[in-house]
Amino acid sequence: MSLLPLFDLSLRGRAATPGLEFVRPDGSLASFTFGELDARSDLLVRLLLARGLKTGDRLAFFLQNRVEVIDLWLAGAKLGLIIVPVNVLYRERELRHILTDSAPTAVVTSRDLAAFIPAGVPVWDVDALSAESVGQPAGRVAVPADADTPMSLIYTSGTTGASKGAVLTQGNFATNALALVTGWGITAADRFLCALPLFHVHGLGNGIHCWLLSGCVMRLHERFEHAKAAAWFEDFRPTLFFGVPAMYVRLLELPSEQARAIGARLRLAVSGSAPLPTEVHEKFRQLYGSVILERYGMTETLMNVGNPYEGERRPGTVGLPLPHVAVSIRDEAGAPVADGVTGEVWVKGPNVCAGYWRRPEATAAAWRDGWFRTGDVGVRAADGYITLQGRRSDLIISGGFNIYPREIEELILEQPGLREAVVVGVPDPVRGELPVAYVVVDPAVFDEAAVGARLRTQLASFKLPRAFVRVEALPRTALGKVQKHLLPKWRE
Ligand code: MLC
Ligand code: AMP
């Protein structure tokens, strides 16, 4: 199953219909019909061909949400390119790794972001690319594709520090979106407000694909800004919203009358990428009169499990396996456990990526007997509802962005005056968790301000430790493992 015939339901089937409203940073709207989007990506395909790109080549983008991200994605599907989305918050270290590992022909970026790209990586300016594509001959060029055609390499951090590229195929995106569009009753009559970043699978895999397959109208924002969210909802009057829990926490700040009116028009509000606290679920229901549908996914698998559209959306749970996904809860030895018993969540289905890019060992370690081991720990109730209880690794999720402590610990330990470091997630009412570093320092050498400044140039802002808590020694087991639960409590 390839993507273009599904996209064509909108690109060609609804060519004259308004499909996209992009809110420019100055607040003005740029509107496009589906036919115009089709034509824009046709021109881009011609330009990419002229620049020598061919099926299987990687093309990275380091961009805030904008229409050119959609052009690139559609051109990628038409040409069989492997698109590499990169989080705009990443800085030198993260960028160097991804842009080296994926070996892209080029990275498409904007003037604002170009300064962050490490030297030696070919950079294409997005505005120049768009302007040049306008002069290309019109008409579609598309290469044949199938379910196994790689569509994207999306980097996700492993427990070992360096992030790995999950090879997601056209079939992965297609089956995921078909399941969501059907299961969530998304139609051309919907109005979808999208403020999720398009460089992660929540915005890209779910948002863009549900929009294109259903033919609804999408209003796309550069990024979520909580101070403006009320005005956005009032103005666009969406029926459909996808968000991370931090966005729903922010939406609880709206006055109740306004929230009611927004909720009355909202057919479906979906939350995912991090746990949705039950009190947020409940407060949102009270304030908006709308019951959030929480679902669970990951970069390697797209969506796995979700609360039902029809039926009970049970707070604190991620619901039931999606129709095309098999879920099994396993013990440490890999044997299935009984309902009510905690274990690791394993998944199998056409949603699971083809493996990690050029990392056979990491691929071998993550798959067993055809099942993908998610690393998430959960339990299934007798009626099938799954509750996630944590992770086998120390993953911290802040505002829906993932942080692997080890990556930060390694970087901290490279700094002068640091003897030992451990990074833990502390609870935060808005972002879910915040990273805090516990450090053993050499006081004569350690300069907290200098270390903080250096980390800021190297790491995405959401990964920066909120504080450095100095301790005499890290609590360790006899085997030397840090006992994070014995660290002193941190207070801001
Ligand atoms: C956040 N920031 C951005 C940004 N998003 N900067 C530029 N562009 C963006 N797109 C920066 C801000 O500048 C600020 O930096 C900090 O992050 C917090 O932003 P905020 O707006 O003050 O905070 P907040 O109201 O808490 O909102 C944060 C947020 C953001 C919810 C908008 O966390 C977000 O967009 N999260 C979505 C993450 C996501 O899509 N995850 C899906 C992964 S896929 P500073 O320097 O001031 O701190 C996955 C699988 C699955 O997990 O199941 O979906
Ligand atoms: P990523 O690597 O960015 O794809 O993040 C995937 C991880 O986010 C999953 O393995 C889960 O740990 C977490 N996650 C996604 N959705 C949920 C959810 N609804 N509840 C709890 N955790 C979630």
Image: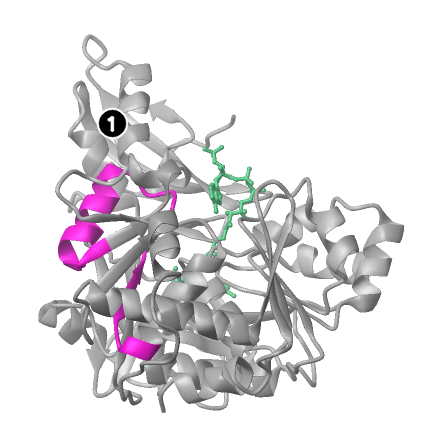
The reply to whether the magenta stretch includes residue 80 is yes
Q: Is residue 67 left or right of residue 127?
A: right
The foreground one among 269 and 218 is: 218
| Quarter occupied by residue 260 | bottom right
Residue 469 placement (x, y as % from top left): 36, 25
Q: Is residue 337 left or right of residue 440?
A: right
Residue in view at x 85 percent, y 52 percent: 258
The foreground one among 398 and 211 is: 211
Residue in view at x 18 percent, y 48 percent: 122
The foreground one among 94 and 212 is: 212
Q: In this view, does 318 lie to the left or right of 333?
A: right
Residue in view at x 65 percent, y 44 percent: 27
On screen, 107 above or below 70? above
| Quarter occupied by residue 167 | bottom left
On screen, 5 above or below 17? below
Q: Quadrant of ligand 2?
A: bottom left
Residue type at mark 1 is Ala
Residue 317 placement (x, y as % from top left): 57, 71
Residue 263 placement (x, y as % from top left): 80, 63
**Count of numbered labels shown in the rendering:** 1
On screen, 328 above or below 359? below
Residue 43 placement (x, y as % from top left): 37, 68
Q: Is residue 384 visible?
A: yes
Which segment is the magenta one? 78-106
Q: Of helix, strand and loop, which one carries label 1?
A: loop
On screen, 299 above or below 382? above
Q: Is residue 460 visible?
A: no
Q: Report the residue marked by disc 1.
A: 473
- Image quarter (top left, top right, bottom left or bottom right) of the N terminus: bottom left
Residue in view at x 18 percent, y 59 percent: 104
The foreground one among 21 and 413 is: 21
Q: Is residue 107 left or right of residue 30?
A: left
